[in-house]
Amino acid sequence: MDLFEYQGKQYFARYDIPVSPGGEADTVDEAVAVAEKIGYPVVVKAQVKVGGRGKAGGIQLANDADEVRLHAGNILGMDIKGHTVHRLWVELSSDIASEYYVSFTLDRPNKVYLGMLSKEGGVDIEEVAETNPDAIKRISINPIDGFSLDQSRAWVADADIDEAAREQAAALIVKLYTCYVEGDCDLAEINPLILTTDGIVRALDAKVTLDANAEYRHPEWEVWAATDTEDPREAMAKAKGLNYIGLDGSVGIIANGAGLAMTTLDIVNQVGGSAANFLDIGGGANADVMTAALEVINADPSVKSIFVNIFGGITRVDEVAKGVIEALRRVDITSPIVLRLDGTNAVEGRALLAEHLNDKLVAEPTMLEAARRAVALAGN
Amino acid sequence: MSIFIDENTKVIVQGLTGGQGRFHGVRNRDYGTQIVGGVSPKKAGENVDGIPVFASCKEAVAATGATASFVVVPPAGATAAILEAAQAGITFIVCITEGIPAHDEAKCYNILKRDFPNTRLLGPNCPGIISPGKANIGITSGDIALAGGPVGIVSRSGTLTYQALHELSQQGVGQTTCVGIGGDPVPGTNFIDCLEAFEADPETKAVMMIGEIGGSEEERAAEWIKKHMTKPVVSYIAGVTAPPGRKMGHAGAIISGSSGTAQAKMAALEAAGVIVALNPTEAGEKMVAIVKAL
């Protein structure tokens, strides 16, 4: 789960990482109220889960209530790379002396943690990585060794961070590491980490991605779940606990396993169709899961046919078959369904379905044939 | 021959008394796998369909001489179960658990590497491993595999592993071993480990490798294939039309540049001399042609 900047800063605050005072606002009046409370000048910042909002005009300085009103009015509702701005973060403006970059993430090939630190932080950090890679100092941290303040001090010195910022930066980076590990982040990134003209080091932005697998031990994440997605189809799927991504095509997809779901998209595309969604129903596909999946897809008006592609492993095909039968009993599905069922208990599953097959529920023996049928039924 | 497991491998099941553990443990036993015991601290002394249950891995290993373990334990306890198996002297651990936090996996992997260098972990979040006709540890349906070789399969995706087995078996082409390495960020066993084992196995004559978008394991495997692999490899990468991930932050871009896409992986594999198919069916057809020409 990606966090908005304001959520990331709230999370940072839990780990004692200094951020600028500020507050969130959903309306112009709320933005003014936040600004009046913290004092001027303030920065009005669009909250979107995509980079490049500054360049798009989504971050503006305001010196008084009128300017807050003007900028908040302009930014709310703004479209930034396909993301609509519904919320603002209004914070006290900082007088910036230097901008740095710091992040922790997983080094997948080496299976250790990777820290990256640069004294050339700011909007063009990816360009720095391309043109001057030596300006980004990387460290490997073995998860079983941890990361000490002394290591942090040495790293900060190696990256040639300004003397005036070093001790504060070293301490802050240790806290960021703690947030990354104990906070179960996939990514904890600060860009920029700033040194103010009056000598304070703090996080001016927050990019945090949480590991969904760790949700069970973080009840504090629950408040952010509601804002996790914009697409109403995705919101509905999420509420039903499904792994769903909305797309633009006409063939609704239900598959078990992310790999098979991706392959189903690929094959539908290769036989001339296009998928309306990615939907992985995962391991335990019972009647409730199948009903939920069919409900979400049925609610999408662009869906013209539904391709259910199941290869049973831990998922038993007879359970899937029961799920489809039960789902059809509970939901009035408007589009025809094409089934392709193989794997664990496939014979039993197919037998269960045999008497239910008709114009609106057809079965095909292979994935390729089922894809062709589904695409044909979608009218492509 | 087969890689990693065969008919002589003695296996215990951690979590045998749970619903999934019971279903798949018994199925694995019925397939012919030497499932010699189960571990469940609260149900020691009982049995599951005749398979004795022990209180700990240590006791199970002492009583049965098992060298492999099948971990079917929920996410919160899975890495502790893996480490318990390693401590008991188990040298091959298959963990199918889905949903383990990445930081737990990273810690577990590095503890194994430091303290138990001779123990191989397969998974987590993988379908397991099957050496058709000999042994099956995991959740793969044994009846979709065909004994006798000559193809080795390695796959990152569970359901695509089954698909690959199915495509070959339908055409009468058997498998030596099929390994599902799993799609989690910190897999215990990677493509290169399996390619190396298949290259060394005299009965494996060709390898099918199923990858997917994300990470750089396929690119690394391509490099290894170019340098070391003498046997033909057919590959399929899932996710050509997958929606691009909404990447936050810059760290990912700084690390990986343009790698990680299906196209980049396919190009790297093709450059290494791998035959790249556009879907699992085509991969099966291309592999059948290779086997027929052997």
Image (cartoon, rainbow, N blue to C red):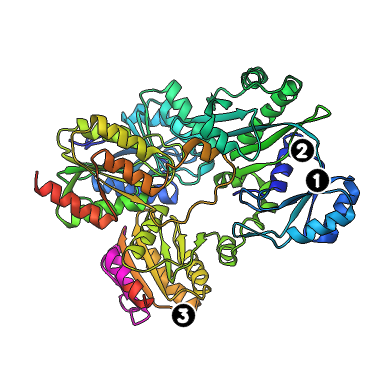
* CA distance for labels 1 and 2: 9 Å
Give whichever of discs 3 and 2 has the lower sequence position: 2
Q: Nearer the viewer, residue A135 or B107?
A: A135
For badge 3, the amino acid type reads: Thr
* CA distance for labels 1 and 3: 49 Å
Q: Chain of mark 2?
A: A
Q: Please name the residue that numbered disc 1 is placed on.
A: A91
- Residue drawn at the location 64% of the way across and 40% of the way down: A123
Q: Is residue A2 magenta?
A: no
Are the residues at dot 1 and dot 2 in contact (C-beta closer than 8 Å)?
yes
Residue B260 placement (x, y as % from top left): 42, 43
Asked if residue B134 can be seen in this view, the reply is: yes
How many neighbours does mark 1 have within 10 angstroms: few (below 14), some (14-19), or many (20 or more)? many
Asked if residue B143 can be seen in this view, the reply is: no
Q: Nearer the viewer, residue A244 or B94?
A: A244
Q: Nearer the viewer, residue B231 or A318?
A: B231
- Residue drawn at the location 43% of the way across and 25% of the way down: B113
Residue B22 placement (x, y as % from top left): 39, 49
Label ID, residue A19: 2
Label ID, residue A334: 3
Residue B181 shown left or right of residue A129 in the figure = left
For badge 1, the amino acid type reads: Glu
* CA distance for labels 3 and 2: 51 Å
Residue B179, by quadrant, is top left
Residue B139 shown left or right of residue A288 in the figure = left
SS under mark 2: loop
SS under mark 3: loop
Residue range in magenta is A344-372
